[in-house]
């Protein structure tokens, strides 16, 4: 967002990136079957969002005692050291990691981080 509350630059950047990847898929299209091409396009469009959904689903199950205990032990509610207005927002504790690449991908880090980014209406819908 720029100072005029416009997302035009971001949209242009995303479209440019998508066009680049679709162009590259088009270049190898003649070597792929129809089914393989469909899988590739679907993976390009939806794979990252599906991963986020699955991680958030596991976090939800952990909070509602529907996940295995070894996963539930990895998720802890955030308990501030003093009274804050955000205390009732069902935030989760995000552990500090030593390595940025692998540590941030761990379920105990990525799950709470994604959960804390959700709007309050989604976190409290059940």
Image (cartoon, rainbow, N blue to C red):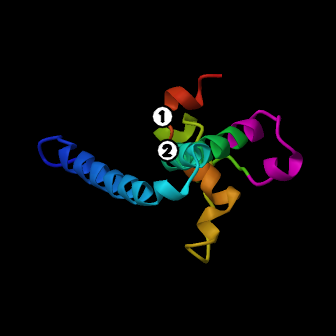
> 10 Å neighbourhood of mark 1: few (<14), some, or many (≥20)?
few
62 is within the stretch colored magenta = yes
**Label 1, on which residue?**
119
Q: Which residues are magenta?
A: 59-74
- Indicate left or right for 25 with 53 as reference: left
Q: Position of residue 56 (x, y in %)?
A: 63, 42
Taking the spot 47% from the left edge, 38% from the top edge, the residue there is 85
Q: Which numbered tag is attached to residue 117? A: 2
Residue that sits furthest to the front in the current view: 30
Residue that sits furthest to the left in the current view: 4
Q: Secondary structure at mark 1?
A: loop
Q: Position of residue 80 (x, y in %)?
A: 58, 50
> 10 Å neighbourhood of mark 2: few (<14), some, or many (≥20)?
few
Asked which quadrant contains residue 6, the reply is top left
Q: Nearer the viewer, residue 112 or 9?
A: 9
In the image, residue 5 above or below residue 10? above
Q: Position of residue 57 (x, y in %)?
A: 68, 38
Q: CA distance from mark 1 to mark 2?
A: 7 Å
Asked which quadrant contains residue 7, the reply is top left
Q: Is residue 82 visible?
A: no
1 is within the stretch colored magenta = no
Q: Is residue 64 visible?
A: yes
In the image, residue 109 above or below residue 46? below
Taking the spot 50% from the left edge, 50% from the top edge, the residue there is 44
Q: Position of residue 46 (x, y in %)?
A: 53, 43
Q: Nearer the viewer, residue 65 or 55?
A: 55
Taking the spot 74% from the left edge, 38% from the top edge, the residue there is 63
């Amino acid at each position: 967002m720029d100072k005029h509350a416009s997302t035009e630059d971001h949209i242009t950047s995303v479209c440019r990136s998508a066009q680049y990847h679709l162009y590259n898929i088009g270049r190898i299209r003649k070597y792929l079957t129809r089914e393989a091409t469909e899988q590739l396009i679907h993976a390009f469009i939806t794979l990252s969002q599906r991963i986020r959904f699955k991680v958030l689903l596991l976090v939800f199950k952990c909070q509602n005692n529907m996940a295995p205990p070894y996963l539930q032990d990895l998720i802890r509610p955030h308990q501030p050291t003093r009274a804050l207005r955000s205390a009732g927002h069902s935030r989760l504790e995000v552990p500090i990691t030593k390595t940025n690449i692998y540590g941030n991908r761990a379920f105990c880090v990525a799950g709470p981080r994604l959960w804390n980014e959700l709007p309050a209406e989604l976190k409290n819908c059940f």
